[in-house]
Amino acid sequence: MAKTKVEKSGGLLERSPSHLLHRVLQLALDIYAEECGAAGITQRQFAVLSAVAQNEGVTQTALVKATGIDRSTLADMVARMITKGHLERQRSDQDARANSVRLSDSGRAILEEVAPMVAMADARILALLKPGKRDGFLSLLADMAGADLHPGVDAEPKAKKAKADKPKKDKKPKKDKAAKKAA
């Protein structure tokens, strides 16, 4: 029996960036949980704490851009982290409609506690690659993550974009059936 295109190409999953990225994310989160589980914060909570530490008084809108976490999920996370005492929220000095977020003393302490654990998790993840491929891998991930984090960046594939940029040929208007019969 003849093989289909999918069978000849080794299957769709082995060539699917979205599937492979999902699998790598699952692996990375498992490693994170093994290294950091005792600290009691998730990888996303660590990302929020780190982003706030890098820019005290950051708005929640800027946190969405910095972390890639959607607006409603981030608002819920920030509220829970405020309740736990890791973050403090106040009205932004620049925009009275926006909230700014700061680390509390507790948040700073948990960030300092978990940072070496996250570093170990990251080292374990990178150790899955040959040493010569690690920097390239991080660069590719940064490029891909940056495409979503920087407004105006065109992430459309070049081939598709080139096709979309070509001017369409003017087609001659079709004559309707009545006009054809009259002619």
Image (cartoon, helix red, strand yellow):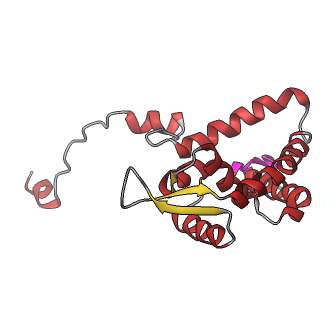
In depth, the one of 50 and 31 nearer the eye is 50
Which of the 4 image quadrants contains residue 46?
bottom right
Residue at the limit of the structure toward the left, as seen here: 182
Q: Residue 59: where, in percent of width, then height?
A: 49, 54
In depth, the one of 23 and 182 nearer the eye is 23
Name the residue located 86 percent from the left edge and 40 percent from the top edge: 126
Q: Is residue 61 left or right of residue 78?
A: left
**Is residue 182 positioned above or below 129 on the image?**
below
Q: Is residue 129 found inside the magenta-colored segment of the image?
A: no
Name the residue located 89 percent from the left edge and 46 percent from the top edge: 120
Q: Is residue 164 left or right of residue 25?
A: left
* Residues rendered magenta in the picture: 5-17
Residue 28: in sight, yes or no? yes
Which quadrant is the N terminus positioned in?
A: bottom right
Q: Is residue 173 left or right of residue 8?
A: left
Q: Residue 127: where, in percent of width, then height?
A: 92, 39
Q: Is residue 8 found inside the magenta-colored segment of the image?
A: yes
Q: Residue 50: where, in percent of width, then height?
A: 68, 49
Q: Residue 26: where, in percent of width, then height?
A: 81, 59
In depth, the one of 40 and 69 nearer the eye is 40
Name the residue located 79 percent from the left edge and 50 percent from the top edge: 112
Which of the 4 image quadrants contains residue 91?
bottom left
In depth, the one of 57 and 180 nearer the eye is 57
Q: Main secondary structure of the magenta part?
A: helix
- Exactly how many numbered labels are in the figure? 0
Which of the 4 image quadrants contains residue 85?
bottom right
Residue at the limit of the structure toward the front, as seen here: 105
Residue at the limit of the structure toward the top, as seen here: 132
